[in-house]
Amino acid sequence: MTSSDRLSLNQATVKYADLATALSVTQEAGISSIGLWREPVADVGLRQAVAMVADSGLRVSSLCRGGFFTASDPALRSQALDENRRAIEEIAALAEAGAPGSAPVLVLVAGGLPEGDRDLAGARARAGDAVAELAIDAAGAGVVLAVEPMHPLYAADRGVVSTLGQALDLVEDLSPDVAGVVVDTFHVWWDPTLAEQLARAQGRIASYQVCDWITPFPGDALLSRGMMGAGHIDFAGITALVEKAGYTGDIEVEIFNQEIWNSDPLAVARRTVQAFGTTVGR
């Protein structure tokens, strides 16, 4: 496949679209793959979602998201692990329903610091323990757990795993068949050791996500992602390093941006195709 054939529309980019609409606009825009989110799947129920994916003829590139397992309280930790086990079952079923080339990849966001907790290293260690425990379930289901490092901006409330190096540390003792990493340009583009860590990630990249870093930030830093080409990221350079590390799967466009969310989903999908083709796809 060419790079453009590998384009996948992550549902977050058309956040307000339900599952049926997301599948439809992906098809209409000529995109052959979709990255799913658990909430729209839950809205219709897993059985119906599986049928809808099968009917769509689209590949499934990943399911977002699992994780959020940094709690120190044993009861909360147990609840988080059980929720992740359900997510493992969901992506296994959805990927099986998708077109050939679908990826049984569950994206994991570690979670932030528990309330009142300032032990960042301890929270990160608990995230690693959780991934190791869930790897047993993932192996049984044929699923790959993909740890996503998040920009340090989100370390307190969303992701204590802040660099690609830290994500690789969490999975290095596990088989690449069950545990890998997500490379999201928004979260890693700034890292001065990125080239070194991508070389280290040989065979470990389970998902590649793209969007741009735009300035100035809007009021909500969570919604500061832009369409490719609108900001500061060198997509050609990062994509070359990702492919050199052995990644040949779908490339998801995942954008959190209020203006884009407020736009017509089909128009966003078509805009995504154009922007991808002139940045990543070229």
Image (tube, rainbow, N blue to C red):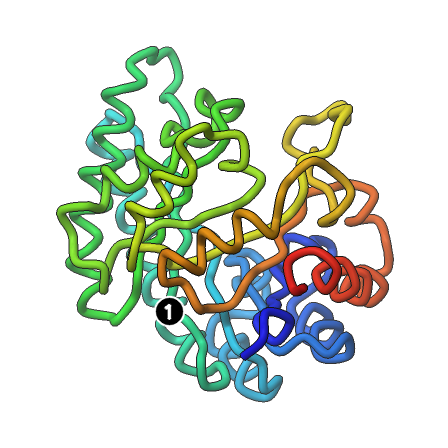
Q: Is residue 237 above or below residue 190?
A: below
In this rendering, position of residue 155 left or right of residue 258: left
Residue drawn at the location 33% of the way across and 13% of the way down: 117
| Residue 204 spot, x, y in % from top left | 30, 55
In the image, residue 279 sits, relative to residue 156, either above or below, namely below
The quarter of the picture where the N terminus appears is bottom right
Q: In the displayed structure, does residue 247 sit left or right of residue 273?
A: left
Across and down, in percent, residue 179 comes to 26, 55
Please report the residue visible at 31 percent of the width from the left and 42 percent of the height from the top: 80
Q: Give the secondary structure at mark 1.
A: loop
Indicate the quadrant where residue 196 lies.
top left
**Residue visible at 68% across and 73% down in the picture:** 20
Q: From the viewer's perspective, tell me whether residue 93 is left or right of residue 56.
A: left
Residue 139 vs 73, above or below: the answer is below
**How many labels sit on residues?**
1
To which quarter of the image does residue 222 belong?
Answer: top right
Mark 1: amino acid? Pro
Q: If the image is split into quadrants, where does the C terminus sit? A: bottom right
Coordinates of residue 205 in the picture (x, y in percent): 36, 55
Q: Give x and y (percent) for residue 256.
A: 67, 43
Residue at x 23%, y 37% (from the top left corner) = 169
List the residue tagged with mark 1. Answer: 104
Q: Nearer the viewer, residue 195 or 207?
A: 195
Q: How busy is the neighbourhood of tag 1: few (under 14 within 10 Å), some, or many (20 plus)?
A: many
Answer with the quarter of the image where residue 259 lies: top right
